Amino acid sequence: MLSNINIKNVKVKTGDLLKLLRKRAGLTQEQLGEQLGLSRITIQNIESGKNATMDTLLKVLQHWDMLGSFYGYVDKEINNNNHESLY
């Protein structure tokens, strides 16, 4: 299963998650965009699995209270220092 993971698949799944969370909250793309200080087109692009900047992705994680978990994962990996190159 993990061998099938690639950047495109992660972007699509991330977009699927954003769409699920947005709909669960009863928000339109426009409303979520306003809350995040982003355009509706940016939200639409993320939900479609298109490229997002690091800042945009972090805004989304922060909005859905996932930034701490992401930070914790990154920090743990850095402190673990036993991982292979990501490239």
Image: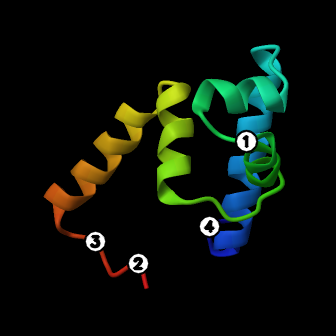
- Which amino acid does the dot numbered 4 rest on? Leu
Report whether residue 41 is seen.
Answer: yes
Name the residue nearer the viewer: 29 or 3: 29
Report whether residue 5 is seen.
Answer: no
* Residue contact between numbered discs 3 and 4, judged by CB atoms under 8 Å: no
Q: Is residue 54 left or right of residue 19?
A: left
Name the residue nearer the viewer: 27 or 20: 27
How far separated are the C-alphas under marks 2 and 1?
A: 31 Å
- Which amino acid does the dot numbered 2 rest on? Leu
Quadrant, the C terminus: bottom left
Query: Of discs 1 and 3, which sits in the foreground?
Result: 1
- Which amino acid does the dot numbered 1 rest on? Ser
Of marks 2 and 1, which one's residue comes earlier in the chain?
1
Q: Is residue 45 above or below residue 8?
A: above
User: What is the residue that sits farthest to the top in this orientation?
Assistant: 26
Of marks 3 and 4, which one's residue comes earlier in the chain?
4
Q: Which residue is mark 4?
A: 2
Colouring: rainbow
Q: Which residue is mark 3?
A: 83
How far separated are the C-alphas under marks 4 and 1?
A: 33 Å
Query: Of discs 4 and 1, which sits in the foreground?
Result: 1
Query: Of discs 3 and 2, which sits in the foreground?
Result: 2
* Picture quadrant of residue 70: top left
* Picture quadrant of residue 77: bottom left
Q: Which residue is mark 2?
A: 86
Quadrant, the N terminus: bottom right
Q: Which residue is mark 1?
A: 39
* Residue contact between numbered discs 3 and 2, judged by CB atoms under 8 Å: yes
The residue shown at (71%, 37%) is 18
Query: Mark 2 Cα within 10 Å, few/some/many (few <14, many 20+)?
Result: few
Query: Mark 1 Cα within 10 Å, few/some/many (few <14, many 20+)?
Result: some
